[in-house]
Image (spheres, rainbow, N blue to C red):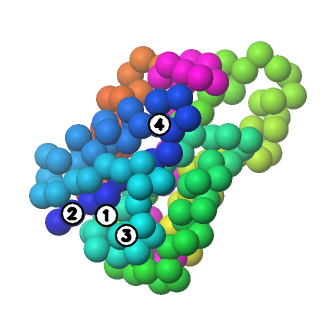
Amino acid sequence: MNALVVYDSVFGNTKRIAFAIANALTEKVDDVETLDVRMVRPDRVCDVDILIVGSPTRGFRPTGDTVEFLNAIPDKALTGIKVAAFDTRISEQDVKSRLLPAMMKLFGYAARPIGKRLVAKGGHLAVAPEGFFVQASEGPLKEGELERAADWAKKVLS
């Protein structure tokens, strides 16, 4: 069994989560590769058993590079492949604005649209999309998020 973890990262936090996920997968997966979204050809995803894609939440959605990558995956290319999606985000409790938490609830985060796009390309969503928390817009990650990411990754294998 092989897995590919694809990520985009603006301040390094999503990259750290991606590598925590990949490390957790190595316990039961023979070959795990972790790549920046700009380094992956869209047809590369056809050769894996598990595909996990993550992005920081930017403007309530995935980064442009992540969206471009997802759109470039050939239709039905993910048929028979377990997929999962994650993002990094600021928690509503840490936002200092009254308006922004309402907008976060209304517009959401990056993980859900990533997951929907992976399913639209034929993938089987192995676990619900997940968000991992940063302390501020540039990070760092909140304490315990790398461990939580590893635990989430293990659920992909169930």
Q: Mark 4 points at which residue?
A: 14
Residue at 17% x, 57% y: name it: 31
Image location (x, y in percent) of residue 118: 51, 67
Looking at the rendering, which quadrant does residue 24 occupy? top left
Q: Is mark 2 on a helix, strand or loop?
A: strand
Marks 2 and 3, the one that precedes in the sequence: 2
Q: In which quarter of the image is the N terminus?
A: bottom left
Residue 127 among magenta residues: yes
Circle 3 packing at 10 Å, graded few (<14), some (14-19), many (20+), is many
Q: Which of 141 and 7 is in front in this view?
A: 7
Range of residues picked out in magenta? 121-141
Looking at the picture, which amino acid does disc 2 mark?
Asn
Circle 1 packing at 10 Å, graded few (<14), some (14-19), many (20+), is many
Marks 4 and 3, the one that precedes in the sequence: 4
Q: Mark 2 points at which residue?
A: 2
Q: Mark 3 points at which residue?
A: 45
Q: Mark 1 points at which residue?
A: 50
Q: What is the spatial separation of the Cα atoms under label 1 and label 2, in whole angstroms?
A: 7 Å
Looking at the picture, which amino acid does disc 1 mark?
Ile
Task: Say whether residue 104 is left or right of residue 7.
Answer: right
Task: Say whether residue 61 is left or right of residue 16.
Answer: right
Instruction: State yes or no: discs 1 and 2 in contact (Cβ < 8 Å).
Output: yes
Marks 4 and 2, the one that precedes in the sequence: 2
Residue at 47% x, 30% y: name it: 13
Q: Nearer the viewer, residue 131 or 51?
A: 51
**Depth-wise, is mark 2 or mark 3 nearer the camera?**
3
Marks 3 and 1, the one that precedes in the sequence: 3
Residue 34 among magenta residues: no
